[in-house]
């Protein structure tokens, strides 16, 4: 599900930060706590010049936007074009993607670029 999270820093109270976030399915029932934990994590890892944030509000904008549920499909890391990567497959909709290096981000394969959100159990590719 997609939510719009608003937060602020006390030092800049007139500047509200607004972010759109896709909540993973396992956290949908407690999406506010998920957002609060994101803010806590941000505050615990502040870099020089960053200000501590406080959660202002969380509003559901679209209940139908779902995250992919990725499962690693390569037994070991692969070297492709001089880059280390792992291959993944969404266990719900079967699209595939890659995670490069130690990044936590999985990039959908180009042929699935239009599947930003998971369509669930009804997509068989």
Image: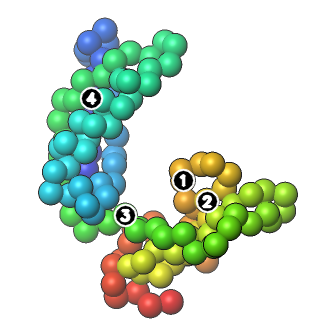
Find residue 79 and report its horizontal and vertical position in percent. Answer: 79, 63
Tag of residue 99: 2
- Relative to 52, is 98 on the left or the right? right
* C-alpha gap between disc 2 and disc 3: 16 Å
* C-alpha gap between disc 1 and disc 4: 24 Å
Residue 111 visible? The answer is yes
Tag of residue 72: none
- Relative to 122, is 10 on the left or the right? left
Residue 86 lies in what quarter of the image?
bottom right
Mark 3 lies on residue = 67
Tag of residue 7: 4
Q: Does 29 appear above or below 18?
A: below
If you read the primary sequence from the N terminus, does the residue marked by circle 1 or circle 3 appear first? 3
Residue count near mark 3 (Cα–Cα under 10 Å), binned few <14, some 14–19, many ≥20: many
Mark 1 lies on residue = 105
If you read the primary sequence from the N terminus, does the residue marked by circle 1 or circle 2 appear first? 2
As helix, strand or loop, the secondary structure at mark 2 comes to strand
Residue count near mark 1 (Cα–Cα under 10 Å), binned few <14, some 14–19, many ≥20: few
Q: How many marks?
A: 4
Find residue 36 and report its horizontal and vertical position in percent. Answer: 23, 36
Do the numbered discs 3 and 4 sit on residues whose CB atoms are within 8 Å? no
If you read the primary sequence from the N terminus, does the residue marked by circle 3 or circle 4 appear first? 4
Q: Nearer the viewer, mark 2 or mark 3?
A: 2
Do the numbered discs 1 and 2 sit on residues whose CB atoms are within 8 Å? yes
* C-alpha gap between disc 1 and disc 3: 12 Å
Residue at 84 percent across and 62 percent down: it is 81
As helix, strand or loop, the secondary structure at mark 3 comes to loop
């Amino acid at each position: 599900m997609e939510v719009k999270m608003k937060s602020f820093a006390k030092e800049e109270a007139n500047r509200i930060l607004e972010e759109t976030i896709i909540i993973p399915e396992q956290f949908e029932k407690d999406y506010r706590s998920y957002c609060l934990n994101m803010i806590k994590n941000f505050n615990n890892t502040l870099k020089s010049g960053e200000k501590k944030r406080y959660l202002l509000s969380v509003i559901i904008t679209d209940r139908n936007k779902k995250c992919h549920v990725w499962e690693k499909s390569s037994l070991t890391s692969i070297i492709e074009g001089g880059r280390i990567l792992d291959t993944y497959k969404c266990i719900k909709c079967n699209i595939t993607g890659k995670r490069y290096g130690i990044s936590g981000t999985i990039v959908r394969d180009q042929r699935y670029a239009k599947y930003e959100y998971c369509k669930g159990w009804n997509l068989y590719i």
